[in-house]
């Protein structure tokens, strides 16, 4: 009983026998990702992209086919024949004839698209000759929408940006920025995202809360892609809960919670974690949607590292299927694990490696290797007694260090000045030679 | 044999190489003992010149001892010091003297010359040769810090075109830096000439790669790399140094262990530092303790090594004297710097140039 309590190494308000601890752990989702539920969170092009991504990355054949089936259904609702062809190729006939290549549909859609394109062009030319700003803007906007639906994102982006010259009110600018951001995210060009977010935020007065929330999510995504986890976390945490489902073309509320939570855990220090995540009332609404992330953060804060790492492990498989997060999962996980190790050793003068290995669910050699890496990196100030398997905290002796530095600086100064005098002399000689030659 | 007194300008180096039967040796004579030494030298050199090879081969030992004596005498004449205007002046003789010392492997005597600080240089070429040979003498004498300094001076000296001495010096610089400091920074300081910065790395490609491979800490990789490029290192006459680099790798790995561990078993040391057996690891650790590079105790019963802190407490009389002398030396250096600065600002050439630029 006693050893169990020490091993859990947490902040316990009241002594908790093992059974209660099990009860405190709510849902653990190690099951497969529920594709239907997942896809229902999104709309538009991102839904298809995500489904295709899942089908690419997932190893489970049934999940793969299910994702492809749903992607097929979704693509047929739109007008993107190129994407349709891709999906059909990926299905490869595995789902039967009704999910095969539908040439008739493709031709019909293409013809319709050509007709519409001509119409739009004519309208736009007419507006341009009339020089009515508002109509020209609408014309370019419609073109942008058309190209976006067809899947030619580059053209769509160009047309959206062209509306900029014809925007008269702040609302127009914000509209243009949101469209540009949407297309940039789909294209994966997050540099544009950041610039358009800042452009939109210049007119803060005209923004309604939902738009502000949308912009913050977009900015957070851009920072995430750029591996700036701290800033990404801050952006996600500041997102207002009014976002709800209104940005489902890009991101779901659950994603905001997951991304924000994990980035914060990997990059914030303890004080910031408490202030901005745990005590953050707004963010709490998001965390309700993903209870595992909430539990995970609370466990980390209260030093229940074993269960925290358990949750992380369970979430990992599903997070690797997420289109924005999959590149960063490994880095974030390593960061969180390192932070846990550092936090564990911080308050102690000496730590028994056996107990630590238990708390982190690894072997003693494993934990010794991890600690060695952290010590070499200077993130933990300690030394390992490998014979007795104890970690001793080590505080540098300031006085000695100062003496050493002083003597070292003296030697370096001496050496550098001598070298400098020598070089100056060489230059002077060289210069003298040149001057005497001139004379 | 009459010894003629020749003016100093026709001072000829005495490196024992015989080019023709007739050579004029001019010395500033003073003492009778020196005259005798001179006679001896001259006669020995004549003998080497005219003797036949087969006869020499019959009595090799005597020949060797005669040659050695010749070298000693020559070196004891201490030629460079006589021509030096001040102890801070570099003369054309310095590099030649050092070359002799190198060839004769009398590093200690050469090192004595190097201890003077040089500030005035007449010929840049002399300077390059001096630093290069000086560095090699220091390596022979195992004073790697000074060697590093000399090579650094060559590499960062102002030069308008590339010269081969700088390239060779740079190669040795990399190797000595790896042996002594256990690391190498590939970036040049700001005051290096642009010619050097652009070209030095191109000429010494295998050495730079050696340094990169060293940084990874993987001994087998390093050894493989050395094997693969053995010829190139041999061509540069640097194979000995390269082997020293490889053996210093073990020391580097062990030293890193002292930062993270309090006690470690010899097996673990052998594994982490990629040494083959614990016995070898023990040898290495023992060597390093004796050299004073790490502080540790070996417990042979458990096969454990306990790493200790540097016992220097900086509270002894010797330490105070050391610090005091350092302070004095640096104060002198500062004064020198100030006088040089003042003299330069009074220099007419400098003032005219600065004046011209200001007008533009």
Image: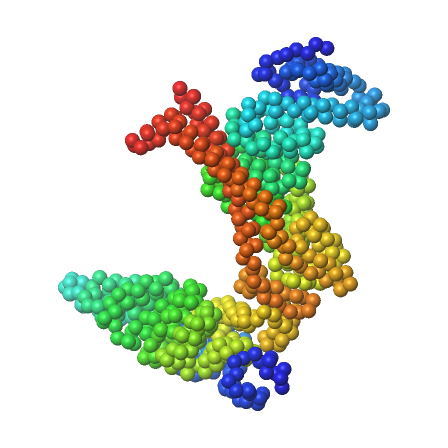
Give the colour scheme of this rendering.
rainbow
Q: Which one is in front, B174 or B294?
A: B294
Q: Residue at x 63, y 57 (%)?
A: B309
Pinpoint residue A222: horizontal percent, then vertical percent: 38, 66
Q: Residue at x 68, y 45 (%)?
A: B243
**Which quarter of the figure is the N terminus of chain A placed in?**
bottom right
Q: Which one is in front, B289 or A44?
A: B289
**Which quarter of the figure is the C terminus of chain A placed in?**
top left
Question: In the rendered view, does A192 fall on the left or right side of A101?
Answer: left
Q: Residue at x 68, y 11 (%)?
A: B3
Dividing the picture into quadrants, the one containing residue A203 is bottom left
Which residue occupies the extreme right position in the image?
Answer: B58
Pinpoint residue A335: horizontal percent, then vertical percent: 51, 68
Question: In the rendered view, does B182 fall on the left or right side of B340?
Answer: right
Look at the image and tell me whether residue B337 can be seen: yes
Is residue A330 placed above or below A290 in the rendered structure? above
Which residue occupies the extreme front position in the image?
Answer: B317
Question: In the rendered view, does B71 fall on the left or right side of A341?
Answer: right
Look at the image and tell me whether residue B221 can be seen: no
Q: Residue at x 50, y 46 (%)?
A: B187
Pinpoint residue A240: horizontal percent, then vertical percent: 33, 77
Pinpoint residue A199: horizontal percent, then vertical percent: 28, 64
């Amino acid at each position: 009983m006693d050893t169990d309590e020490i091993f859990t190494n947490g902040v316990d308000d009241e002594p908790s026998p093992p059974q209660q601890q099990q009860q405190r752990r709510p849902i653990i989702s190690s099951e497969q990702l529920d594709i239907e539920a997942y896809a229902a969170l999104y709309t538009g092009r991102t839904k298809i992209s995500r489904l295709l991504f899942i089908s690419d990355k997932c190893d489970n054949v049934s999940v793969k086919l299910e994702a492809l089936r749903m992607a097929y259904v979704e693509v047929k609702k739109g007008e993107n024949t190129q994407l349709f062809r891709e999906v059909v190729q990926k299905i490869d006939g595995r789902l039967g004839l009704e999910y095969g290549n539908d040439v008739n549909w493709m031709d019909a859609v293409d013809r319709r698209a050509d007709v519409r394109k001509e119409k739009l062009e004519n309208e736009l030319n007419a507006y341009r000759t009339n020089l009515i700003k508002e109509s020209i803007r609408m014309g370019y906007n419609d073109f942008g929408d058309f190209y976006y639906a067809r899947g030619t994102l580059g053209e769509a982006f160009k047309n959206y940006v062209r509306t900029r010259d014809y925007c008269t009110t702040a609302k127009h600018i914000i509209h243009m920025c949101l469209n540009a951001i949407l297309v940039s995210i789909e294209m994966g060009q997050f540099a544009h995202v950041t610039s358009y977010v800042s452009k939109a935020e210049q007119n803060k007065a005209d923004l309604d809360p939902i738009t502000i929330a949308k912009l913050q999510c977009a900015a957070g995504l851009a920072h995430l892609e750029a591996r700036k986890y701290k800033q990404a976390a801050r952006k996600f945490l500041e997102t207002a809960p009014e976002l709800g489902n209104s940005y489902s073309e890009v991101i779901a509320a659950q994603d905001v919670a997951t991304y924000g939570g994990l980035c914060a855990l990997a990059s914030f220090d303890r004080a910031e974690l408490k202030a901005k995540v745990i005590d953050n009332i707004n963010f709490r609404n998001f965390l309700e949607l993903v209870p595992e992330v909430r539990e995970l953060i609370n466990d980390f804060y209260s030093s229940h590292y074993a269960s925290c790492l358990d949750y992380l492990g369970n979430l990992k498989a599903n997070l690797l299927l997420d289109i924005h997060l999959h590149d960063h999962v490994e880095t974030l996980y390593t960061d969180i694990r390192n932070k846990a190790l550092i936090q564990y050793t911080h308050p102690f003068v000496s730590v028994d490696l056996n107990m630590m290995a238990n708390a982190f669910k690894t072997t003693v050699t494993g934990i010794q290797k991890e600690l060695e890496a952290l010590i070499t990196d200077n993130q933990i100030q300690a030394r390992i007694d490998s014979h007795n398997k104890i970690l001793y905290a080590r505080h540098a002796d300031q006085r000695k260090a100062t003496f050493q530095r002083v003597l070292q600086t003296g030697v370096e100064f001496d050496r550098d000045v001598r070298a400098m005098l020598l070089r100056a002399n060489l230059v002077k000689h060289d210069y003298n030679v040149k001057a005497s030659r001139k004379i | 044999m009459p010894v003629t007194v020749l003016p100093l300008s026709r001072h000829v180096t005495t490196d024992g190489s015989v080019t023709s039967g007739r050579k004029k040796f001019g010395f500033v004579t003073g003492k009778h003992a020196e005259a005798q030494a001179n006679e001896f030298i001259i006669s020995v050199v004549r003998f080497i010149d005219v003797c036949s090879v087969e006869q020499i081969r019959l009595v090799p030992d005597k020949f060797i001892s005669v040659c050695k004596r010749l070298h000693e005498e020559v070196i004891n004449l201490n030629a460079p010091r006589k021509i030096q205007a001040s102890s801070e002046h570099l003369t054309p003789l310095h590099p030649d003297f050092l070359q002799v010392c190198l060839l004769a492997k009398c590093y200690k005597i050469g090192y004595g010359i190097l201890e003077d600080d040089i500030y005035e240089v007449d010929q840049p070429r002399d300077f390059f040769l001096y630093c290069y040979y000086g560095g090699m003498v220091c390596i022979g004498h195992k004073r790697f810090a000074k060697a590093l300094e000399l090579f650094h001076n060559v590499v960062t000296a102002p030069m308008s075109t590339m010269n081969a001495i700088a390239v060779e010096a740079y190669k040795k610089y990399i190797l000595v830096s790896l042996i002594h400091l256990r690391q190498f920074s590939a970036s040049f300081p700001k005051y290096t000439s642009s010619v050097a910065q652009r070209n030095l790395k191109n000429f010494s490609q295998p050495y730079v790669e050696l340094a990169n491979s060293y940084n990874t800490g993987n001994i087998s990789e390093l050894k493989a790399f050395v094997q693969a490029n053995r010829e190139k290192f041999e061509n540069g006459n640097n194979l000995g140094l390269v082997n020293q680099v490889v053996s210093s790798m073990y020391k580097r790995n062990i030293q890193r262990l002292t930062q993270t561990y309090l006690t470690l078993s010899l097996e673990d040391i052998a594994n982490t530092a990629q040494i083959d057996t614990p016995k070898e690891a023990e040898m290495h650790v023992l060597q390093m303790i004796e050299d004073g590079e790490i502080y540790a105790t070996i417990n042979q019963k458990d096969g454990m090594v306990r790493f200790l802190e540097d016992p220097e407490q900086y509270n002894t009389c010797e330490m105070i004297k050391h610090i005091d002398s350092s302070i004095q030396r640096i104060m002198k250096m500062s004064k020198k710097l100030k006088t040089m600065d003042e003299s330069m600002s009074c220099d007419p050439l400098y003032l005219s140039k600065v004046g011209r630029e200001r007008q533009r």
